[in-house]
Image (cartoon, rainbow, N blue to C red):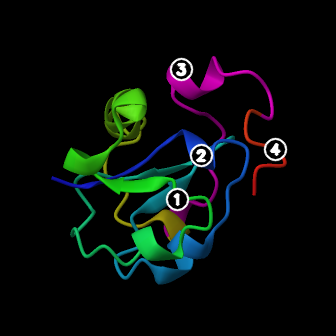
């Protein structure tokens, strides 16, 4: 089990969760943040600080955003496990699910 970042993060990219993460497992893509499922220690520090309520424990992800678990996992398929987001900085890509969303889907909702 792990935490998942879902659609409310798209085009918002608030980094409060990154600052709270004790294991540096939240990576920044072009349009949203992603939690590395193998690096996450399930501490939950990220969830309460997210201003748009985009972070969910895997089993508690709302039905309409269930596919975001897969997006968080598959985002790392070609990256592997870098062992810390701060080492590599922003990653110039997103999962195809996020790439296919309309531009600025959440702009102005925060």
Q: Looking at the image, is mark 4 or mark 3 nearer the viewer?
A: 4
Query: Crowdedness of circle 3 by 10 Å Cα count: few (<14), some, many (20+)?
Result: few
Residue 8 circle label: 2
Q: Mostly what secondary structure, the magenta segment?
A: loop
Q: Residue at label 1?
A: 53
Residue 17 circle label: none
Marks 1 and 2 close (CB-CB < 8 Å): yes
> Which residue lies at the image location 37% right of the left edge and 78% below the top edge?
45
**Taking 79 as reference, is 61 left or right?**
left
The front one of 22 and 83 is 22
Residue 96 circle label: 3
**Taking 41 as reference, is 79 left or right?**
right
In this rendering, the answer to whether 10 lies above or below 35 is: above
- Most distant residue in the right direction: 108
- How far is the residue under mark 1 from the one under mark 2? 7 Å
- Most distant residue in the left direction: 1
- How far is the residue under mark 1 from the one under mark 4? 15 Å
Q: Secondary structure at mark 3?
A: helix
- Mark 2 vs 4, N-terminal side: 2
Q: Position of residue 15 (x, y in %)?
A: 63, 68
Q: Secondary structure at mark 1?
A: loop
> Which residue lies at the image location 76% right of the left edge and 49% below the top edge?
109
- Mark 3 vs 2, N-terminal side: 2
Asked if residue 78 shows in the view, the reply is no
- Mark 4 vs 3, N-terminal side: 3
The front one of 84 and 9 is 9
- How far is the residue under mark 1 from the one under mark 3? 22 Å
């Amino acid at each position: 089990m792990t935490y998942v970042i879902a659609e409310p993060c798209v085009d918002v990219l608030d980094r409060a969760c990154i600052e709270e993460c004790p294991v540096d497992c939240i990576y920044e893509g072009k349009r949203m943040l992603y939690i590395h499922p193998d690096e996450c220690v399930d501490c939950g520090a990220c969830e309460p600080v997210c201003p748009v309520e985009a972070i969910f424990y895997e089993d508690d992800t709302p039905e309409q955003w269930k596919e975001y678990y897969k997006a968080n996992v598959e985002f790392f398929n070609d990256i592997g496990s870098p062992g810390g987001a701060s080492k590599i900085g922003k990653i110039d890509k997103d999962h195809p699910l996020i790439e296919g969303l309309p531009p600025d889907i959440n702009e102005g909702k925060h």
